[in-house]
Image: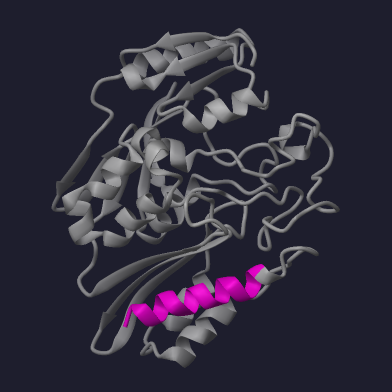
Amino acid sequence: MKTFENVDVKSVKEAVGLLQKFAGEKKNAAVVGGGSEYLQLMKVRVATPDYIVNLKTIPGLNYIKEDAGGFRIGALTTLAELEEHKGVQEKLLFLSQAAGEAASPQIRNAGTVAGNLCQRPFCWYFRSASHVCLRKGGEICYSVAGDNRYHAIIGGGPSYIVHPSDLAPALVALDAKIKIAGPAGEKTIPLEKFFVTPQVNARRENILGPADIVTEIQVPAPKTGSKGFYYKARERQAWDHAIVSVATVVQSGSGAVRDARVVLGGVAPIPWRVPKAEEFLRGKAIDDAAAQKAAEIALDGARPMKDNVYKIDLAKNLVRQALVASV
């Protein structure tokens, strides 16, 4: 692990100012909240910061607040706190369940909501010291000709990583927003627009600049007649990232779908929303046939590689199950 300097900051303004200063000095700086995921990157020297800006010392960034408009979740709220929050369990149970599916109990006690959304990929080529892959500034994505059993089947190229967050698909399905502080002040954008594909930037997973910090997630109150589900397939039940995950939110009334959101995880470099499947469902009564058709639409255009064809049927089955459960 490379030698670095830890800086404990007392405010978001101080953190942004320091990050801006370090960027101007051409120094490599990173922010950490829980720090569990970033520590792994440092151990394998994928991350080699000169400075670590520790956000844990900022008071007031760890909270879950509920009002008539929904929930506001502070960036430093831990996954365990989100999982166990009574209000979230009562009104957004599948978000609580998604938080509970992430990592292990020990990591959930330290890992933060913002950290989960800002994870780097868990591709073995990216995390290998012996491979300078495209995402690390090289010229090739080794998964194309290599072992690609867990890689993207949708939206890939030139890099074929998948986004590892459990929270992201659920929050995108809930139409959540994310608040970001930076040198120009604060801005709030739809979470769906936070993530970027490799076609936009082959080295990044999100829009954060070198001096930007996530400060809050905003989740609107659920609409009357809506149900949400999060399903995750993984190899190890004890702790593992999603091979495929699905988040759905379906609002129904008078026996028909009024609105729907379908978001896939583990299949694309970003949480993959499928508007065509959502549009198909509107105005229909969901039965097994309609759910199966929506699942087919959701995976239309998938382009698997040699080792991950299985993901197509797996994703279809999860979409179908989530939609049938919403009836």
**Number of numbered labels in the structure image:** 0
Give percent across and percent down for residue 119.
Answer: 53, 39
Picture quarter with the C terminus:
bottom left
Is residue 59 or residue 314 the one in the foreground? 314
Picture quarter with the N terminus:
top right
> Measured along the vertical axis of the image, is residue 249 above or below residue 317?
above
> Measured along the vertical axis of the image, is residue 15 above or below residue 149?
above
Question: Which secondary structure dominates the residues rendered in magenta?
Answer: helix
Is residue 287 or residue 242 the one in the foreground? 242
Give percent across and percent down for residue 38.
Answer: 53, 28
Q: Does the magenta portion include 313?
A: yes
Residue 93 sits in quarter: bottom left
> Measured along the vertical axis of the image, is residue 214 above or below residue 314?
above
Give the residue displayed 52% in from the left and 85% down from the top: 292
Give percent across and percent down for residue 213.
Answer: 43, 28
Q: Does the magenta portion include 116?
A: no
| Left/right of residue 175 with respect to residue 28 in the rendered view | left
Give percent across and percent down for residue 92.
Answer: 26, 59
> Measured along the vertical axis of the image, is residue 3 above or below residue 151?
above
Give the residue displayed 77% in from the left and 38% down from the top: 134
Q: How is the image coloured?
A: one colour
| Left/right of residue 306 with respect to residue 76 in the rendered view | right
Residue 314 appears anywhere in the view: yes
Is residue 58 or residue 256 the one in the foreground? 58
- Magenta-drawn segment: 311-327
* Extreme residue in the left direction: 68
Residue 63 sits in quarter: top left
Is residue 52 or residue 276 the one in the foreground? 52
Residue 298 appears anywhere in the view: no
Give the residue displayed 52% in from the left and 55% down from the top: 271
